Amino acid sequence: MDKLVLTVPEIAKVLDLSTATIYVMVRNNEIPYKKLRGKIVFHRETIEKWLATPTA
């Protein structure tokens, strides 16, 4: 079963981006994320919806 919550290294691998790029995207609010116990995490379903949303 796929994980419901992904860490920065995991989402970087899924999106084929570096962890540094993910942190920049988080800092610029370019990717949906949450903080869980002080760690940045990504809800898989939210990321899938975000990826499916067409950009302007």
Image (tube, rainbow, N blue to C red):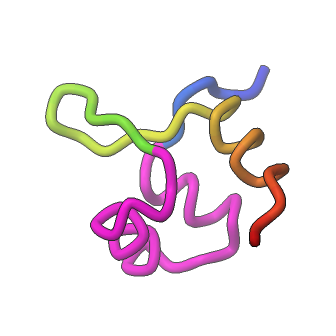
Residue 28: x %, y % from top left: 34, 69
The answer to whether residue 34 is magenta is no
Residue shown at 75% from the left, 39% from the top: 49
x 18%, y 27%: residue:
37
Q: Is residue 42 above or below residue 23?
A: above
Q: Is residue 13 left or right of residue 24?
A: right
Q: What is the x, y in percent for residue 32?
A: 49, 46
Q: Horizontal placement of 8 versus 50: left or right?
A: left
Rendered view: 18 above or below 50? below
Name the quadrant of the N terminus. Answer: top right
Q: Residue at x 61, y 24 (%)?
A: 4
Against 49, is 37 above or below?
A: above
Using the image as rendered, state which of residue 4 and residue 50 is in the foreground.
50
The number of numbered discs placed on residues in the rendered structure image is 0
Residue 31 in the figure: left or right of residue 2: left
- The picture quadrant where one finds residue 34 is top left
Q: Quadrant of residue 39?
A: top left
Q: Residue furthest left?
A: 38
Please provide the residue range marked out in magenta.
Answer: 7-32
Q: Nearer the viewer, residue 43 or 27?
A: 27
- Which quarter shows the C terminus? bottom right
Residue closer to the observer: 15 or 31: 31
In this view, 45 is above or below 13: above
Where is residue 36? Give x, y as percent. 27, 28
| Dominant SS type (magenta) | helix
